[in-house]
Amino acid sequence: MTPPVAEGLNSELVQIDLLPRRPERKPEWLKARAPGGETFHNLKKLAREQHLHTVCESANCPNLGECWNQKSATFMMLGNLCTRRCGFCAVPKGRPEPIDLDEPRRVAYAVAQLGLAHAVVTSVNRDDDNLGAARAFAEVIREIRAQAAGCRVEVLTPDFQGNDESLRIVVEARPEILNHNIETVPRLYRIAKSGGRYTRSLEFLRRAKEIAAEAGWTQATKTGIIVGMGEEMHELLAVFRDLAERRVDILTIGQYLRPSRDHLVMQRFYTPDEFAFLKHEALAMGFRHVESGPLVRSSYHAQEQAESTGLA
Ligand code: SF4
C-alpha cells in the first residue's frame, strides 16, 4: 500500500513512511554461537578480578564466544564510559572517572596470565584528557613488554582530537599495530560519529606512519569500517581509496548490527558476496590484508591479520 500524502503536496516529492517498520530478520550468515566453555569463563573471571573491561562485552560483540574461547579478548582501558556518543556504538556514554594509572599494569597482567601471543588494547574516548589517554596507551605497551615478553601489541586508539603530541606518545611506544577506525563514510559522520572528523581520522593514519618513518622504523596501521548504516557502494570505495593513499596496511569491513532501539537504524544487510566484492576491490587498491565479512569486527582474527601482513 502506498502511504497517504497530505492533500495538495506532490506525491513524487514527499515520501513519508507512515507504516511501522518491521525489523528485518537476521540472515543465517549473521548467527553466532552463544558464549560458553571453560576458557570463556576463566577469561571472564580474570577480567572481573582485575577490574578490567573488555570491548567484547561493552559493545555486545557477536563474536565474543568464539574469540574468548580462543583466548582472544580486546581489553578496554580508561573506564567504561565514553565521552562521545557515536550513533552505532553500544559502549555506555557519560562523564568518566579520572584515568586509573594502575590499569595498564593490570591489563598486562591479564595478558600474561592468558599467555597471549597477540594482545589488542583499546579504550573509550577521553576528550577530557587526550594526553593522559595517550600516556596510558604507551604505558600498557611498556607493561606488556615487561610482563609478557614476546607478545605482540595492537592498540586501537581514539583520534585524540587530532592532538599530534598524543599520537607521537603512542607511536614512540612502538605498538606492532596501530589501529584507528574510520567507521563510516564522510557523509554519515554527522549522524554516526558526531564527535569525529573524517579528515582528522585520515590524517591520524597518515601521520602515524610519518612519525615512525622520521624516527627510522615502519609503523603498521590498521582501520575498520562498518557497513549497513546507509552508505552507498561508491562512497565505500572512495573511502578505501583515501585510506590506501595513506598506505594503511590492514582494513576490516563488517556488518552494522543495531545494538538497541536507541541506536542508529540499520539500513540493510550486506550479503557475503558483497563483502567478497569489497575485499577484492580493497586488495586491488594495495591493502596488505583485508578482513571482510558479516561478523567481522576490528579485532576479529587480529592475530592472523597481523601475521599475514608480515609486518608484525
Ligand atoms: S568513541 Fe564512539 S565508537 Fe568509540 S567507544 Fe565512544 S561512542 Fe563507541
Image (cartoon, helix red, strand yellow):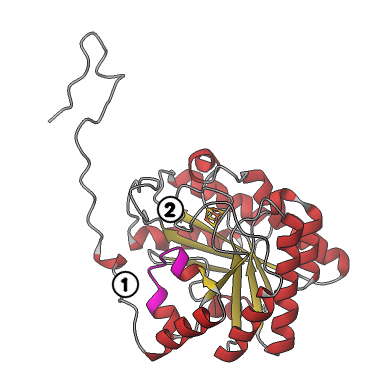
Query: Do the residues bearing badges 1 and 2 touch, measured as CB atoms within 8 Å?
Result: no
Mark closest to the chain's N terminus, 1 or 2: 1
x and y percentages locating residue 161 in the rendered image:
70, 49
Q: Position of residue 212 (x, y in %)?
A: 81, 66
Q: Amino acid at mark 1?
A: Ala
Q: CA distance from mark 1 to mark 2?
A: 18 Å
Identify residue for label 1: 32
Which residue is most to the front?
A: 97
**Residue 112's disc number:** none
* Magenta region includes residue 82: no
Residue at left offset 40%, top offset 72%: 63
State which image quarter holds ligand 1.
bottom right
Residue 282 horizontal/vertical position (percent): 53, 59
Say which residue label 2 marks. 227
Residue 274 falls in image quadrant: bottom left
The residues colored magenta run: 57-65
